[in-house]
Amino acid sequence: MLKPESVVGVLGATSLVGNRLFVPEFKPLSDKNLTWVAFSRNKQELMSEEIDNVHWCVLHDNQLPAVAQKIEYWICLAPIWVLPDYFSLLESLGARRIVALSSTSRFSKINSIDVSEQNLANRLVDSEQQLINWAEKNKIAWIIVRPTLIYGFGRDQNITTIARFIQRFGFFPLLGKANGLRQPIHVDDVARICLLVLFEENIINKAYNVSGGEILSYKNMVERVFNVLEMKPKYFHLPLIVFRIIIAILHFIPQFRKISVGMAHRMNQDLIFPSQDAKHDLKFEPKGFQLSKDDVGK
């Protein structure tokens, strides 16, 4: 376990997961005597945050921040491919343990029909390997956490995008039966496991795939979104060629620019990533898909 006087550095502190890391619910896990140094590029968000034991630090391009204290423990919640940019910072501050957030997309998108998604998967794979190579070269313990589809508080790009589409158009398009299985994981469960693996120092040099506590079909997942929006489910089952046309049109609307043909194609693929290792090693028990109005930004 970490010593009470330990300092923990957090990269990507104002990200979706980072935004939940310091909430009171996690105080029993994170020990109120710990000092946190939270790094982010978003100065406006940093200045609006006032949380006990958290010191905020703004990151600038091509300029490493001046930090007085030694920081041995780190959590990276920024995209894992930006982490190599800060290897020298972590080395200079005496890093000896790091938890980095990646994604199961490294597996699910590697053979996507969308080239940009293939590139993303390869980027995740390469970034994970860069982290492992650097950490082992410098005798730094590494742990990689790969969540499945993250949702929560209307800030994700998964469930929130579905909700926005439904609210705007009143229906949702499906490819075929859309019976591919999913395990959505709430952002609080992702934050929780990052803390759990950080504090379990007997766990070193290991990657965990983590998923939510409930398995449901893609169509049922969308139906839950309709229900929480208090709207009657309405679907159109469309062929892939029509999806391509719809998505090309949607890319002219800023909030839907990240929707891809690959997303539609995966509606009928099972994306199941059991969390047995996390359950065994950490007693990690994520909640089911308990969608609320807050989770769809309503």
Image: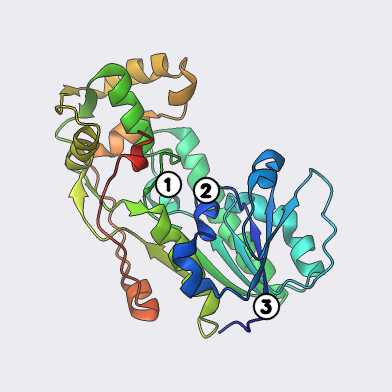
- The residue carrying mark 2 is 122
The total of numbered circles placed on residues is: 3
**Of the numbered discs in the image, which one, if any, rests on residue 110?**
1
- The residue carrying mark 3 is 6
Describe the element under mark 1 as helix, strand or loop.
loop
**Residue 269 or 37: which is nearer the viewer?**
37
x and y percentages locating residue 297 in the rendered image = 38, 35
Q: Is residue 206 visible?
A: no
CA distance separating discs 3 and 2: 35 Å
Q: Which amino acid is tagged 1?
A: Ile
| 267, above or below 98, in the image | above
Q: Quadrant of the N terminus?
A: bottom right
> Residue at point 78% right, 73% down?
70
CA distance separating discs 2 and 1: 7 Å
Which of disc 2 and disc 3 is earlier in sequence?
A: 3
Q: Are marks 2 and 1 in contact (CB under 8 Å)?
A: yes
Category of crowding for the residue at label 1, using alpha-carbon neighbours closer than 10 angstroms: few (below 14), some (14–19), many (at least 20):
some
Q: Quadrant of residue 147?
A: bottom left
Q: Which-is-in-front pick, marks 3 and 2? A: 3
CA distance separating discs 1 and 3: 39 Å
Q: Which amino acid is tagged 3?
A: Ser
> Residue at point 79% right, 43% down?
61
x and y percentages locating residue 39 in the rendered image = 69, 54
Which of disc 3 and disc 1 is earlier in sequence?
A: 3
Describe the element under mark 3 as helix, strand or loop.
loop
> Residue at point 28% right, 25% down?
166
Rendered image coloring scheme = rainbow
Describe the element under mark 2 as helix, strand or loop.
helix
Q: Which amino acid is tagged 2?
A: Asn
